Image (cartoon, rainbow, N blue to C red):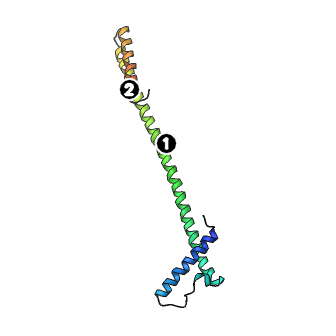
Amino acid sequence: MTLSREERVEQLAAEFHEVYQVEAKRQGDVRHADAYADLSENIKEFDRVLARHALDALEAAEQRTDDLGRRLALFANLHAEEKARAERAEALTDRLAEALKCIEIVRMAAAGTSEDRLRQIGEDARAALRDHADQRGER
């Protein structure tokens, strides 16, 4: 069962009064020995003011904690997205580097190689790209 805010205020006010009584007794002050239930409404209101203030402070702290939690979750998501982008860029860079190597091999080979040999070099280059993609789990 959840208490209403005013019920929580009343409960907390009674607890504050009890703490006050214990401390007053510890210090030898017996003038404030009345139980909370026996106090007049205007005296109870002093404890209620303290209780409301304490609840307000706790709720504000809880709100800040919730806000911080949401911000941390957002940051974690952004970080994960950026990490995934960087990994994709790295994979694309690797694939481009392999393709450029293959193009350079074909270009060098074309400088004085027979047509059949050029075909074989092209097939070898395509196979190398497929192998590279398989190793990276991209196929």
Q: Badge 1: few (under 14), some or many (20 or more) residues near its Cα, within 10 Å?
A: few
**Location of mark 1 (residue):** 81
Vertical arrangement, residue 102 with respect to residue 10, above or below: above
- Identified at 50% across, 46% down, the residue is 77
Depth check: 36 or 5 in front?
36
Marks 2 and 1, how far apart at CA = 25 Å
Instruction: Please give the label number shown on residue 62.
Output: none
Q: Badge 2: few (under 14), some or many (20 or more) residues near its Cα, within 10 Å?
A: some
- Identified at 52% across, 84% down, the residue is 21
Vertical arrangement, residue 22 with respect to residue 5, above or below: below
Question: Residue 117, how many percent across, how many down?
Answer: 35, 10
Check the image and name the residue furthest to the right.
41
**Location of mark 2 (residue):** 132
Depth check: 53 or 29 in front?
29
Residue at disc 2, secondary structure = helix
From the viewer's perspective, tell me whether residue 3 is left or right of residue 102.
Answer: right
Residues at marks 2 and 1 touching, judged by CB atoms closer than 8 Å: no
Q: Earlier in the sequence, mark 2 or mark 1?
A: 1
Question: Residue 110, how many percent across, how many down?
Answer: 37, 14
Q: Quadrant of the C terminus?
A: top left
Question: Residue 49, how many percent across, how many down?
Answer: 61, 77
Question: Residue 132, how many percent across, how many down?
Answer: 38, 26
Q: Quadrant of the N terminus?
A: bottom right
* Amino acid type, label 1: Glu
Depth check: 13 or 69 in front?
13
From the viewer's perspective, tell me whether residue 37 is left or right of residue 136.
Answer: right
